[in-house]
Image (tube, rainbow, N blue to C red):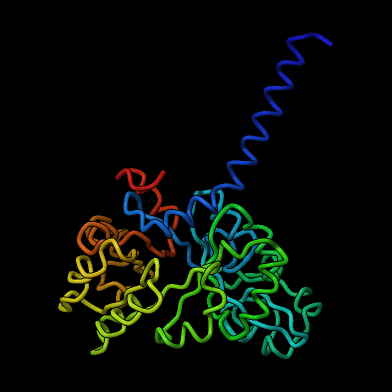
Amino acid sequence: MNKKIIVYIFIILCSNNFFAYAQEDRAQSIREKLLNRDQSSVLVAAHRGDWRYAPENSLLAISNAIKMGVDIVEVDIQRTKDGKLILMHDNSLDRTTTGKGKVAEWTLDSIKTLKLRNGCAIPTKECVPTLEEVLLLAKGQILLNLDKADRYFDEVYTLLKKTGTTHQIIMKGNKSADQVKQVFGKYLSEVIYMPIVKLDKPNALKLIDEHLSLINPVAFELLYENDTNCLPLKMVKKINGKSLIWYNTLWDTMAGGHDDDQSLINPDRGYGYLIYNLGARILQTDRPAYLLDYLRKKGLHK
């Protein structure tokens, strides 16, 4: 065989191996940014995957989010009649599939005969994925925020161990710090837990202090309705260096009006305000491509 051809084949094989390694290493890199409280960039979380491109909570929506460079995908978990864990936001099939009735009243094999509907309620070729299928798709590539999974987390954890994805999982919730330690304590060395705190509540500061003291979370998800609340600005100094700040831009009352819709009009008043004024280093969005484009122009996402 010609030596040039041999060298060419060798280069291709090395390139493919490097690409595969880089892909497998990406999830760990994102996790380390969280654990190190890295403030040099902004992580992007896609709500239910890229659901404007494909049905929410579908393999295609998650796959497209991965391809565009999203760091975290938020997905929702439900359990079937025969005890299988699937991706679905609602506890019924009516809105997002061609089926009718409660998820808990259908077996997995029956649910697999259904088709997912897109954002316009039109049936697609996509089927309802199992949690295991999603874990395998995301393995080594992104982190997954599992919503509604705390109801049966022992079962979830079994799948995480089976698929080797325990270090790619984020759990969030409204539980007190004591409850978090009681319910998730044995998992906290592997699974990341982020408290959700509504800054409009009178006990918000107390909750934050308790979480900082008892579980030292890598990040807080903070919520507030409007800018008359002075706590969001105070949070920047209070938890700076201790935890990162996560804001949701899904709708106005989650982030003081600095949401996706505001950002479509003026991204500096939307995303920019949360980043530069309120110290956000994780943003969850329904418009991941738009947010990524903004962050890359600002040098805040590679």
Question: Where residue 109 appears, x then y in whole percent?
Answer: 81, 77
Rendered view: 74 above or below 174:
above
Q: Quadrant of residue 279?
A: bottom left
> In the rendered view of the protein, which quadrant contains the N terminus?
top right
Residue at 61%, 53% (x, y): give it.
140
Residue 7 position by quadrant: top right
Asked whether 187 or 229 is in front, the reply is 187
Q: Position of residue 78 (x, y in %)?
A: 63, 81
Q: Is residue 8 left or right of residue 29?
A: right
Name above or below for residue 84 compared with residue 240.
Answer: below
The quarter of the image holding the C terminus is top left
| Whole-percent x, y for residue 241 in the image | 28, 61
Number of numbered discs overlaid on the protein picture: 0
Task: Locate residue 175 relative to residue 239 in the image: left or right.
Answer: right
Q: Look at 44% across and 53% down and name the residue there.
A: 289
**What x and y, as percent, mark residue 132?**
70, 67
Residue at 73% in and 79% down: 84
- State left or right for residue 113 relative to residue 15: right
Q: Residue at x 27, y 84 (%)?
A: 204
